[in-house]
Image (spheres, grey):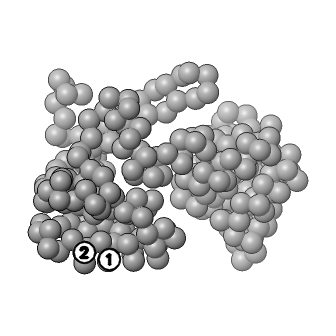
Amino acid sequence: MRILIANRGEIALRVMRTARAMGYGCVAIHTPDEAGAPHVVAADLAVAVPGYLDGAAILAAAQATGAGMIHPGYGFLSENADFAKACAEAGLTFIGPSAQAIAIMGDKGAAKRAAQAAGVPVLPGGGPDDAARIGVPLMVKAAMGGGGKGMRLVHDLADLPEALERAASEALKSFGDGALIVEKALLNPRHIEVQVFGDRHGNVVHLGERDCSVQRRHQKVVEEAPSPAVDPDLR
């Protein structure tokens, strides 16, 4: 059985190392100018594609090489619900979340609703029309994006229209979607994540927490594990 790795560079090499340790053959993809890249040289087979976001070409490469699974790595198509769905429809295993999970978690509004339905505490939030009800300080966020883009902190509701306009413009340019949500802003919070993996067989494992509080322009600078702010009782 072969795995096509829909990524490049160090990311692809790390996936290959683990895949080989598990007995799988590895198929690499590359753009025409990367034919000699390390991940291409290290693979058992390699296929040229127009780009790493060309889902149709990647699916064709998997089918042509007999790869039954596609590992997206991170970035590129790893959080693209349409690509995950296309893999399933082509009879290929997408090594990652289901298309439904990606779609829900990729939309901050839908993600908050899913969390609430599961009994997870969330900050007060809603659409831009809910801003007055929620009160300041407010964080305006791109509903469909990440990476710190499309975010504006609002301390005075008089500044909200400009914040919404700027955030929507940035979100549209960055993600192709200008939809926004607003939520109560926490000033000087700790940003702590818990990594959880599960499979279709019901096996679930967590890998502990990591502290991502050191940020610049809403983007992580340092990730520390375990978190120095989490005591044994909370953990």
User: How many marks do you count on the picture?
Assistant: 2
Identity of the amino acid at label 1? Glu
Identity of the amino acid at label 2? Pro
As drawn, the label of residue 165 is 1
Which residue is drawn at the image coordinates 80% and 46% (left, top)? 90
- Measured from the top left, where is residue 27 in percent x and y? 76, 52
Q: Is residue 157 left or right of residue 176?
A: left
Q: Quadrant of the N terminus?
A: top right
- Measured from the top left, where is residue 129 in percent x and y? 28, 60
What is the quadrant of residue 55 in the picture?
Answer: bottom right
- Measured from the top left, where is residue 199 in percent x and y? 58, 29
- Measured from the top left, where is residue 44 in percent x and y? 79, 51
Q: Residues within 10 Å of mark 2 (few under 14, many from 20)?
A: few
What is the quadrant of residue 141 in the picture?
Answer: bottom left
Which residue is drawn at the image coordinates 36% and 68% (left, top)? 149
Q: Is residue 209 above or below residue 41?
A: above
CB atoms of marks 1 and 2 within 8 Å? yes
Which residue is drawn at the image coordinates 35% and 69% (left, top)? 150
Q: Is residue 28 left or right of residue 157?
A: right
Q: Residues within 10 Å of mark 1 (few under 14, many from 20)?
A: some
Which residue is drawn at the image coordinates 45% and 52% (left, top)? 107
Question: Helix, strand or loop at disc 2?
Answer: helix
Q: Is residue 117 left or right of residue 97?
A: left
- Residue 147 visible in this rendered orientation of the protein: no
Q: Which residue is mark 2?
A: 161
Question: Helix, strand or loop at disc 1?
Answer: helix
